[in-house]
C-alpha cells in the first residue's frame, strides 16, 4: 500500500493541537499493539498506555514543529533535521550516565542516606607527570548541572528509553519525580573543589561530591560518568603546562628573559580531536597556559564560561592548498601574493610544498629577499617547515636563513635571526621533540627566540584517562544516621587503593600539599572550596584568576648548567 506524504493546508498551532490530541491518545486501547515489541513488558495497562501516548505525542509534536518551521511537506529529512536540532538544544541529564548506574539505587544498603565521593589523579610510579593543573569543572557545572535539569518531559523520555534499553522496568521514575517536585528539578548535590588553575601533586583529592538531601543518596555517583570526563581538560592543561616549562627554561637560558613565552606554543589541534566539545575543552585548557591558538572552539568556551572576551590570538597563515593552487612553477608568485595581501602584521607561510630548502634559499633568501627585509619586527615573516625530521629540518632551515639574511648575538651570546624573520615548527611536535629541537638549537648556538611551535594531536588527542590515572571513588557513607569510612583495596593492584572517609586538602608545615582522610582535617585549613550546591554555581572563576593560579614558579624556569632540565 502506497502512502502519500501530504503537506498541511494551513499551519496548525503546535500547543493547541498537542494539548487536544494527548487526552484522546490517553483513552486509546493499546492492547492491540502488544504484537509490536516496544520494549514494554509492564503488565500495568495504564502505565503501558501512558508511555505509548507520550511517545506518540512526542512524534506529533515533532511533526508539527517541522511543519511550523518549514511550511513544507513533512519528510524524513525534515524529521531528522528537527530531531537533531531539538537534541542539541534539549540535553537530558537523566540520560547522561552509564547504563548500569540506572540500577544502582536498588543495590545500596537499606536506610543509606549519604554517599560521599571524590576525584583524584592517582599517583603512579614512573609517570612523567608528578603534578596536574585543575581545570574544566566550571564548564561542566555551568553547561550541564546548574538550574532545573529535571523536568516531567525528561523523566518520561528517560523512562521510555531505559524501558527499551533494559527491556524491564529498572528506571527509578519515582525518585526523579521527587527531585522535580521537592527541588524544582535542581540537583540536591554539593561539590567542593580546589580552585581552578591550581597546581596539585598527584595522589591528592581534587574535588568531592555528596548529596544534600538524604533521599537522593544515589545521585552522588549517578553523576560520576559526567564528572569523570574532567580527565580531559585536566590532562590537556597539564601537558600544555609541561610544554611551557620546557620552553621557559630554554628561552630564559638562551635569551635572558621570558619575553614572548605565552605565544611560543600554538594550538593546531582543532581538526585532530574527536568532537566539537573536545576542541572546546582542550582548546580552553591550553589557553590556561598560552595565548596562541587556532582552535576557535576553545576561545568561545573561555569567553562563554570563563568570562574572557578574547583569550588567544593568531595571525594570517598559508596552507598547502593556497600555495599549490598556483602550480609548482609559480611557488614564488604564491609567496609574493601572501606578502602583498598581508603587508602589515606577522604572517606565516608553509614552505615545504615542494622543497623547503630550495624555498628558503632561492625564493625567500634570493628572489624575495628584499621584500622580506622590508618587513618590520611587528610584521615579520614566519616560515613554516611541515615535513621531515623536525629537529634536523629546522636546524638546516635556520642555517640557510643565516646564510641569506645574517644574524646577531643577543645579550647572553646566542644567535638570533633578524627581527623580521622567524620560524614555526608544527609537524611532529610533542614534549620530547620540543626538548630535542631546543637542545640542538642551543648546541648550535641559537636562541629559542628564533622559533615558535605548533602542536595538534599530541596536545589535544594523544592522551586518555590513564595518562593521569584519573578516578572517582566513594569514600564515606551514612546509614541509619551513622557514618562509615569506606574504601577499595584490590589485592591484584595496590595502586588502585582508594582514600577513606571525608577528605580535605591542606598545606602542611613543610609547605607541601597533602590530603587528610577520615574527616580529620581542619575546616579552616581546607583548600577545597564549595563551588556548586543544590543546582546553583557558588563560585565563578575567571580565566584571569585561573591563569594566575597556573603560572610557572620561578624554579620551573631555570635550566641546570650541566645541561639537564
Image (cartoon, grey):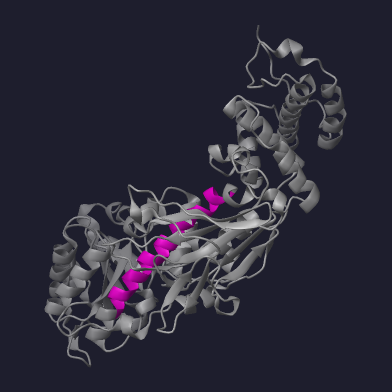
Residue in front for this viewpoint, 52 or 167: 167
Asked whether, in this view, residue 262 is left or right of residue 10, the answer is: left
* Stretch in magenta: 223-248
Q: List the single residue furthest toward the top.
A: 1
Q: Nearer the viewer, residue 369 or 26?
A: 26
Above-or-below relation of 2 to 167: above
Residue 372 is situated, as x and y percent measured from the top left of the image, at: 26, 76
Q: Position of residue 520 (x, y in %)?
A: 54, 71
Residue under the image location 46 percent in, 48 percent down: 275
Say which quarter of the image contains residue 101.
Answer: top right
| Depth check, front residue: 492 or 540 | 492
Residue 205 colored in magenta in the image: no
Q: Quadrant of the C terminus?
A: bottom left
- The residue shown at (59%, 59%) is 209
Residue displayed at 37% across by 60% down: 268
How far from the left and from the top, in percent, is residue 22?
83, 28
The stretch drawn in magenta includes residue 225 = yes
Q: On the rendered structure, is 203 left or right of 381?
A: right
Q: Is residue 144 left or right of residue 327?
A: right
Amino acid at each position: 500500500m502506497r502512502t502519500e506524504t501530504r503537506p498541511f493546508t494551513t499551519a496548525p498551532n503546535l500547543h493547541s493541537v498537542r494539548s487536544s490530541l494527548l487526552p484522546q491518545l490517553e483513552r486509546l486501547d493499546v492492547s492491540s499493539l502488544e504484537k509490536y515489541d516496544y520494549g514494554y513488558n509492564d503488565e500495568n495497562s495504564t502505565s503501558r498506555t501512558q508511555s505509548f501516548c507520550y511517545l506518540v505525542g512526542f512524534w506529533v509534536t515533532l511533526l508539527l514543529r517541522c511543519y511550523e518551521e518549514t511550511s513544507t511537506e513533512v519528510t524524513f529529512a525534515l524529521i531528522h533535521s528537527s530531531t537533531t536540532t531539538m537534541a542539541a538544544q534539549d540535553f537530558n541529564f537523566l540520560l547522561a550516565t552509564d547504563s548500569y548506574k540506572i540500577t544502582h539505587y536498588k543495590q545500596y544498603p537499606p536506610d543509606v542516606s549519604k554517599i560521599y565521593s571524590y576525584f583524584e589523579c592517582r599517583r603512579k610510579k614512573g609517570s612523567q607527570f608528578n603534578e596536574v593543573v585543575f581545570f574544566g569543572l566550571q564548564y561542566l557545572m555551568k553547561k550541564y548541572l546548574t538550574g532545573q535539569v529535571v523536568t516531567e518531559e525528561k523523566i518520561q523520555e528517560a523512562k521510555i528509553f531505559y524501558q527499551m534499553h533494559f527491556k524491564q522496568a529498572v528506571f527509578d521514575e519515582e525518585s526523579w519525580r521527587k527531585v522535580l517536585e521537592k527541588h524544582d528539578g535542581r540537583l540536591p548535590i554539593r561539590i567542593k573543589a580546589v580552585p581552578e588553575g591550581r597546581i596539585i601533586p598527584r595522589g591528592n583529592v581534587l574535588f568531592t561530591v555528596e548529596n544534600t538531601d538524604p533521599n537522593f543518596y544515589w545521585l552522588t555517583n549517578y553523576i560520576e560518568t559526567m564528572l569523570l570526563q574532567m580527565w580531559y581538560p585536566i590532562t590537556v592543561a597539564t601537558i600544555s603546562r609541561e610544554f611551557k616549562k620546557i620552553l621557559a627554561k630554554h628561552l630564559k637560558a638562551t635569551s635572558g628573559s621570558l619575553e614572548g613565552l605565552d605565544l611560543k606554543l600554538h594550538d593546531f589541534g582543532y581538526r585532530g580531536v574527536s568532537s566539537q566539545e573536545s576542541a572546546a575543552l582542550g582548546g580552553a585548557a591550553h589557553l590556561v597556559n598560552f595565548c596562541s591558538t587556532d582552535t576557535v572552539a576553545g576561545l568561545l568556551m573561555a569567553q562563554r564560561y570563563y568570562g574572557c572576551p578574547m583569550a588567544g590570538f593568531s595571525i594570517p597563515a598559508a596552507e598547502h592548498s593556497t600555495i599549490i593552487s598556483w602550480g609548482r612553477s609559480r611557488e614564488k608568485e604564491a609567496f609574493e601574493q601572501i606578502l602583498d595581501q598581508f603587508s602589515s602584521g606577522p604572517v606565516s607561510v608553509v614552505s615545504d610544498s615542494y622543497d623547503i630548502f630550495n624555498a628558503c634559499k632561492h625564493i625567500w633568501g634570493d628572489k624575495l629577499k628584499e621584500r622580506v627585509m622590508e618587513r618590520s619586527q611587528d610584521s615579520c615573516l614566519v616560515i613554516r617547515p611541515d615535513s621531515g625530521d623536525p629537529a634536523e629540518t629546522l636546524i638546516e632551515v635556520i642555517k640557510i636563513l643565516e646564510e641569506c639574511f645574517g644574524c646577531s648575538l643577543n645579550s647572553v651570546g646566542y644567535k638570533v635571526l633578524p627581527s623580521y624573520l622567524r620560524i614555526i615548527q608544527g609537524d611532529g611536535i610533542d614534549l620530547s621533540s620540543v626538548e630535542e629541537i631546543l637542545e640542538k638549537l642551543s648546541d648550535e648556538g641559537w636562541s629559542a627566540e628564533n622559533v615558535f611551535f605548533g602542536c595538534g594531536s599530541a596536545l589535544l588527542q594523544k592522551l586518555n584517562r590513564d595518562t593521569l590515572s584519573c578516578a572517582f571513588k566513594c569514600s564515606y557513607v551514612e546509614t541509619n544516621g551513622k557514618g562509615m569510612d569506606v574504601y577499595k583495596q584490590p589485592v591484584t593492584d595496590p595502586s588502585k587503593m582508594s582514600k577513606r572517609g571525608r577528605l580535605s586538602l591542606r598545606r602542611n608545615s613543610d609547605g607541601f600539599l597533602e590530603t587528610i582522610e577520615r574527616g580529620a582535617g581542619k575546616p579552616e585549613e581546607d583548600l577545597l572550596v564549595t563551588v556548586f550546591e543544590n543546582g546553583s554555581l557558588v563560585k565563578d572563576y575567571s580565566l584571569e584568576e585561573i591563569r594566575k593560579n597556573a603560572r610557572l614558579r620561578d624554579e620551573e624556569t631555570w635550566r641546570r648548567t650541566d645541561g639537564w632540565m
